[in-house]
Structure formats: structure tokens, C-alpha cells
């Protein structure tokens, strides 16, 4: 897998997690731990994208 295709996949996953976080935040009675885990995964992806892009 080339670097550019890997970055594209990471960005897709990041966008998917963004959507999940937004939906979870709007849902009543959402589990705070689950939301925190989604945000943590999203942050790790963002950091990886930035690391590979520089």
C-alpha cells in the first residue's frame, strides 16, 4: 500500500469516526465511556495523519 493510499484510508476512518461521535453526542443516554473511546480513536488517527503528512 502506498503512502498516499494509506493516508486516504486513514482520512476515511477519521471522517467515519467524526460522524459516529456527532451521532453519539446527539443520542439520549449515550455511554460517556463509549463516546470518550471514539474521541480517543479519532485523535489517534488525526495524529497519525499529521505524522505521515509532514
Image: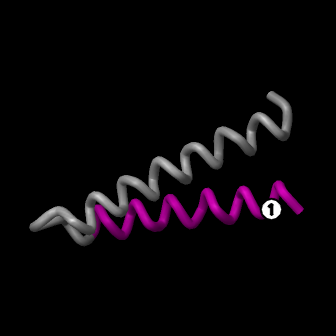
- Residue 26 horizontal/vertical position (percent): 22, 66
Which quarter of the image is occupied by the C terminus?
A: bottom right
Disc 1: which residue: 51
- State which region is magenta: 33-54
Q: Residue furthest left?
A: 29
Q: Position of residue 10 (x, y in %)?
A: 65, 46
Neighbour class for label 1 at 10 Å: few (<14), some, many (≥20)?
few
Hey, which quadrant is residue 8 in on the image? top right
Along the horizontal axis of the image, is 39 left or right of 31? right
Per the picture, the main secondary structure of the magenta-coloured stretch is: helix
Residue beneath the point at 19% across and 65% down: 31
Q: Nearer the viewer, residue 25 or 40?
A: 25
Q: Relative to residue 45, is residue 36 depicted above or below?
A: below
Q: Residue at x 64, y 62 (%)?
A: 46
Q: Is residue 3 left or right of residue 50?
A: right
Which residue is farthest right? 54
Q: Position of residue 45 (x, y in %)?
A: 61, 57
Q: Is residue 3 left or right of residue 48?
A: right
Q: Specify whether residue 8 is painted magenta.
A: no
Q: Residue at x 44, y 66 (%)?
A: 39
**Count the marks: how many?**
1
Residue 43 placement: quadrant:
bottom right
Q: Quadrant of the N terminus?
A: top right
Amino acid at each position: 500500500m502506498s503512502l498516499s493510499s494509506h493516508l486516504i484510508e486513514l482520512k476515511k476512518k477519521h471522517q467515519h469516526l467524526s460522524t459516529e461521535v456527532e451521532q453519539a453526542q446527539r443520542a439520549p443516554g449515550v455511554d460517556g465511556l463509549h463516546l470518550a473511546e471514539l474521541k480517543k480513536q479519532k485523535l489517534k488517527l488525526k495524529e497519525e495523519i499529521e505524522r505521515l503528512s509532514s
